[in-house]
Image: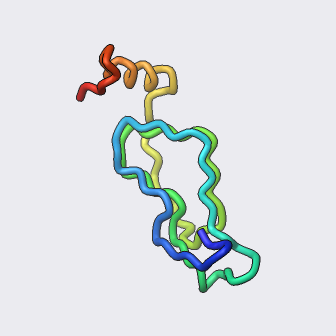
Amino acid sequence: MGGAGVGRASVSLKINSHDTIVDHTWVWRADHGSGVGWNSNTGANGVVVNGNNVTVYGLFVEHYQDLREQPIRPALNAPERVQKLLDQVTSKGEVNG
């Protein structure tokens, strides 16, 4: 958020879905350069997760202004999660449930 032009967002990435896998995500708020600054391109939270059973691999979140930590709920380990999602997919590629 920010960079070539000033941008503002209270949340840059919000995950409301359950049983979600996110891979290699860099959520960034510009903190230097022309036309950006702490009070111009404001951003409270980089990532907010509201869904259950969300697994994120390779997550990078930088330079957001609200430093409160949210509780992390325990999740299934990765192989169990992947198998659970695969079990929901039919032979036609449709998701059950």
Q: How many marks?
A: 0
Q: Position of residue 82 (x, y in %)?
A: 46, 24
Rendered image quadrant of residue 64: bottom right
Residue 62, quarter of the rendered image: bottom right
Say if 11 sits above or below 91 in the image.
below
- Pick out the residue farthest to the top: 91
Instruction: Residue 66: give x, y in percent of width and height.
Output: 54, 71
Query: For the point 67% across and 71% down, which residue is it?
Result: 30
When the figure is inspected, residue 61 is found, relative to residue 1, above or below; the finding is: above
Can you say which quadrant of the picture contains the C terminus?
Answer: top left
| Residue at figure coordinates x 48%, y 72% from the top left | 9
Residue at 60% of width from left, 48% of height from top?
A: 25
Extreme-right residue of the structure: 33
User: Is 64 or 6 nearer to us in this picture?
Assistant: 6
Could you say where residue 57 lies in the image, as x and y percent from the top left?
58, 38
Q: Quadrant of the N terminus?
A: bottom right
Image check: 51 left or right of 43? left
- Is 41 drawn above or below residue 25 in the view shown? below
Q: Is residue 22 above or below residue 16?
A: above
Q: How is the image coloured?
A: rainbow
- Camera-nearest residue between 76 and 82: 82
Residue occupying the point 43% across, 43% down: 73
The image quarter in which residue 20 lies: top left
Q: Position of residue 86 (x, y in %)?
A: 39, 20
In the rendered view, does 97 fall on the left or right side of 5?
Answer: left
Residue sticking out furthest to the left: 97
